[in-house]
Image (tube, helix red, strand yellow):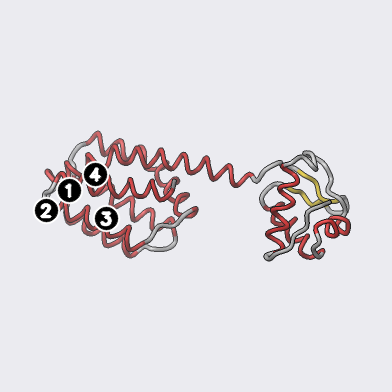
């Protein structure tokens, strides 16, 4: 007996049920699904609900609706889900590299920062708070703040490392925030604590603020 959908939301459940049947091998890769009327009857849903479920799976790269030819299986799983796993793994690696570079740079910045460095840190901190949306503008403002901290360490190697890392870092952070936004107020407070530790010439506090913020960011995304 074929399982039927019984609860709402019907289209989402129908999509999940179709995907499950594909994953169990009921329809092989390249196989044509039964006609709309037959399949809707099997699932116990209306044709409009079935069409919506098919559109959802087509959007996820599992089905291909071909005009006049029917609906075909073109993948055995949702590509976006695996892509998201890979993207999360990449972002986690990027954040780990940031911890290695930025925690040490923050400690050095607290020891070596000049009044001009502190003004740059405060200026970029304010700009970061002002750029909440869109995501790419916020990330650019955030990167400007973190670069100001690294420049304040007065270590050319750390600055060059960060600059060489920046293009990949920017992409990863935009990707991360689009996949899973972070709480703006809490996140900005962490940046304020970092700036204050540098202002008060507290190397251990600056390093810990940097490390704690980035570790929390990694944990929130894992």
Q: Nearer the viewer, residue 197 or 131?
A: 197
Q: Nearer the viewer, mark 4 or mark 1?
A: 1
Name the residue that disc number 2 marks.
200
What is the number of the mark on residue 191?
A: 3
- Depth check: 162 or 177 in front? 177
Q: Earlier in the sequence, mark 2 or mark 3?
A: 3
Q: State yes or no: discs 2 and 3 in contact (Cβ < 8 Å).
A: no
Residue 71, percent across and down?
Answer: 81, 50
- Indicate the secondary structure of the residue bearing disc 1: helix
Dot 1 and dot 2 residues touching (CB under 8 Å): yes
Q: Quadrant of residue 23?
A: top right
The alpha-carbon separation of the residues under discs 2 and 3 comes to 14 Å
- Residue at 75 percent of width and 55 percent of height: 54
Sequence order check: which comes first, mark 1 or mark 3?
3
Q: Earlier in the sequence, mark 1 or mark 2?
A: 2
The 10 Å Cα crowd at callout 3, few under 14, some 14 to 19, many 20 or more, is: many
- Residue located beneath label 4 in the image: 150
Please tell me which residue is depicted at 65% across the width and 46% down the height of the picture: 78
Q: Position of residue 59 (x, y in %)?
A: 68, 53
Label 1 near label 4: C-beta < 8 Å? no
Residue 205 disc label: 1
SS at circle 2 = loop
Q: Return the x and y of residue 56 as percentages of the image width and height.
A: 69, 56
First-in-chain label (4 vs 2): 4
């Amino acid at each position: 007996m074929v399982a039927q959908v019984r609860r709402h939301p019907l289209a989402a459940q129908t999509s999940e049920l179709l995907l499950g049947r594909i994953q169990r091998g009921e329809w092989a890769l390249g196989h044509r699904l039964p006609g709309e009327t037959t399949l809707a009857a099997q699932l116990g849903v209306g044709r409009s609900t079935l069409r919506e479920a098919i559109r959802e799976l087509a959007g996820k790269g599992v089905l291909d609706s071909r005009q006049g030819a029917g609906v075909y299986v073109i993948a055995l799983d949702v590509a976006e889900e695996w892509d998201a796993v890979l993207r999360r793994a990449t972002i986690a690696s990027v954040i780990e590299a940031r911890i290695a570079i930025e925690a040490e740079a923050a400690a050095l910045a607290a020891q070596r920062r000049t009044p001009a460095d502190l003004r740059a840190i405060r200026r970029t901190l304010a700009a970061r708070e002002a750029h909440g949306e869109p995501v790419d503008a916020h990330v650019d403002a955030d990167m400007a703040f973190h670069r100001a901290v690294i420049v304040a360490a007065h270590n050319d190697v750390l600055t060059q490392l960060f600059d060489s890392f920046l293009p990949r870092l920017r992409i990863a952070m935009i990707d991360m925030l689009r996949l899973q936004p972070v709480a703006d107020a809490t996140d900005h407070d962490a940046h304020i604590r970092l700036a204050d530790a540098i202002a008060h010439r507290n190397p251990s506090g600056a390093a810990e603020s940097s490390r704690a913020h980035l570790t929390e960011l990694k944990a929130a995304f894992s």
